[in-house]
Amino acid sequence: MLYRVIVDVSSGALDRFFDYSSTFQVPLGSRVKIPFGNRIIEGYVIEEIEKTDYKTKDIISILDPYPIILPEMLHLSKFLTDKNLRYIDCLRLCIPSKLRAGTVRELVKNFISLNTEIDLESYKELFSKTTRTQSYITLLDRLIENGAFENVLVKEGFSQSTIKTLISKGILNKTREEIRRLPRCIVPQTKNITLTQDQCVAIDSILNSSGTFLLHGVTGSGKTEIYMTIINKMLSIGKTAIMLVPEISLTPQMLGVFRDRFGDDVSVLHSGLSAGERYDEWRRLRLGLAKVALGARSAIFAPIENIGAIIIDEEHEGSYTSETNPRYFTSEIASFRAKYNDAKLILGSATPSIDSYLKAVRGEYTLVTLKTRINDRKMPKMEIVDMRIELRNGNVSLFSKSLLLALDDTLQAKNQAMIFINRRGYASFIRCRSCGYVAMCSDCDVSLTYHREEERLKCHYCGKQFHALTRCPVCGFEGLKEGSVGTEKVVAELNRIFPTARILRMDNDTTLTKDAYLEILSSFAAGEADILVGTQMIAKGHDFKNVTLVGILDADQSLYFSDYMCNERTFQLITQVAGRAGREHKEGRVIMQTYNPKHYVFRFASNYDYCGFFDKESNSREVTKFPPYSQMVRILIAGKDENDAIIETRDIYTKIKEIKANCNGRMIRSQAMRAPIKRVENNYRFQIVLLLIPNSDIVLQEIYKCAVSATNKVSVFIELNPRQLF
Ligand code: ADP
Ligand code: ZN
């Protein structure tokens, strides 16, 4: 038999197939051991072939008891290679990384149990006759009370020989059983839910037609119930489902709700699990023991067949696009899998992306709308505070008067508050008041952020850390000023103003360890803190019933990134954070601080006017020809040597101009320049930004082909519709 195999080596040159012969049948998608050059490596069997032009070697062995790549995923990988991804990288996305190297296995333990077919009492009587066998009786009593693992018994002081003897006499049974390493979740309060009229209408319209649906429902409109009802329906007709949430930090809450509903039918997949948990959850899905895959973006590669529904919650979130290689768009993969399985694809959001909403307006997606919160609960009232006026009135603190009063009220009433600030650390830069020196990263052209708890300056781009400064290294002046504030400083200030309030902080720095976010969220949900301060991590999805106040500090912050999506992002962020308030019986209130209160983003956001915002934003994109009215491509060129990077940029740009001249006007704009952040990790960065008219796949292919590095001194990355340029 002859097979085509891809070798598990990540190198551009090797991303191709090799032919192998085999003396035994190999199912497609199997992981196999193969000779390669003078090494023995792993590979995946892609297809069976009739003949080959090469002299082939034999496949040595099959590594797993079942093919670990599903046929669908072989097709998906092929599809993704057309999108500029490597075939092997695609396959690797489909399996837990530790499984590949064979460094993770099932957790199997030896169990000891009593043989129920014997007359235990007569044995006990027999053993009680001599002191030598006293320990036998103790062990039997221990097992009658609570059965056990062998290693637990040994730990408790029972000897191996006692255990062995009783097994050999047939009094005890020894079994080997697999232990499932179960990811933790936040256990929800049990609720008795009768679907509302609006929910039923939405569910019916989704179940009664096919294709892609955009579920536009305000925050707290009960979208999760809709998702679960649809999934339930799919399970009842023997199908499976994938449910995606935008961030790992949202999985424990959703997992709790899903386990409550679907029990062991649900498995969770995301990169925050331990290798063992990930392996067990993945295998349960692959073997059909679980039918619902829940997780962050990587769960879109869940190894399940016969999918009935794929749900992407908070579909507008940027986290659905992977930022590191291999770069993929979750929605593109979801769309592929939905078509392949003839499944429903449901995109849900309170603030759909302009791109998706435009597709719904054009009829490419079916729009399903939920206009009100469950039980007609009111949207929290949003108040805009002009921080310039505060300043004029002599308030130089981080908090407006009205936010302080509201915080005080909230604390008095024993309710909870969330304070949102989109910057971690204590201060985003440190500047000398005398000479104007700003502390910068040695490897990147960005200012360092001061982290007070650790007394360190950190670079948020490359992670490098430096000693905190007490005086200016240039002029020696001791009056260093802290620039714009971050989460850490907000907590410090709140502690000073409300000394008895219990405050939690959630950002990248406080969630480094596994399950850290779960602990912070559970503790806040359990009422063990009064105020939760955080970055955009706290903005999404969370459902805390006692939160009555949301404060947004520096709402403008995200407006000042100079890219076409910043208005959209700011609108989404504000609406999402605001949506955390007043979700149960207590009414909510939102206070938004800004230096730019007249901006249309704040006007529409404060009235929860998504459609108004969409019209305005979509219009301006149409005029300026930005996505979704075009496709943006950014080619990023980075190299240690500035000159090499410039030469490479010029070369690629020359080829791009050729493509532009021959593409019938499909390329609207092209521009080469320095990247907004000129240097990261000691690499000089340049970019070529292109706008293509939509559906210019052929031009895109040509761009992919020419935008490759000619030398290995420079790296070239291509991003399609990047959400942020830096
Ligand atoms: P969304 O995702 O739209 O923001 P959720 O799905 O989190 O909203 O629902 C908001 C709250 O309303 C949750 O606490 C949920 O349990 C509750 N809920 C949903 N549907 C119903 C219903 N039909 N009756 C009562 N409560 C409901
Ligand atoms: Zn740096």
Image (tube, rainbow, N blue to C red):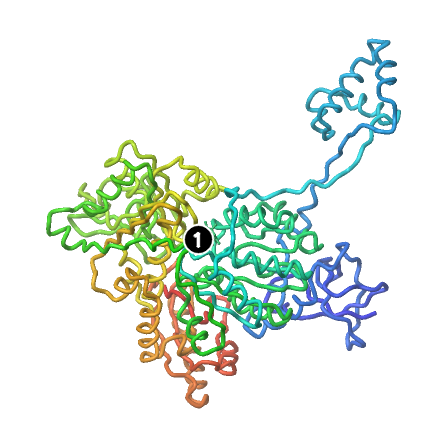
Looking at the image, residue 339 lies above or below residue 405: below
Looking at the image, residue 141 lies above or below residue 403: above
Residue 705 position in % (x across, y down): 52, 78
Quadrant of residue 556 in the image? bottom left
**Residue 161 visible in the snapshot:** yes
Residue at the disc numbered 1: 541
Name the residue at 80% across, 18% down. 136
**Residue 710 visible in the snapshot:** no
Q: Nearer the viewer, residue 174 or 442?
A: 174
Residue 285 position in % (x across, y down): 66, 54
Mark 1 lies within 8 Å of ligand 1 (Cβ measured):
yes
Quadrant of residue 567 in the image? bottom left
Name the residue at 22% across, 45% down. 472
Looking at the image, residue 247 lies above or below residue 171: below
Residue 446 position in % (x across, y down): 32, 56
Residue 115 position in % (x across, y down): 84, 29
Quadrant where the C terminus is found in the figure? bottom left
Tally the numbered discs: 1
At label 1, which amino acid type do we have? Gly
Quadrant where the N terminus is found in the figure? bottom right
Q: Nearer the viewer, residue 289 or 664?
A: 289
Question: In the image, 347: left or right of 580?
Answer: right
Mark 1, other Cα within 10 Å: few <14 / some 14–19 / many ≥20:
many
> SS at mark 1?
loop
Question: In the image, 161: left or right of 538?
Answer: right
Farthest left residue in view:
393
Q: Nearer the viewer, residue 643 or 418?
A: 418
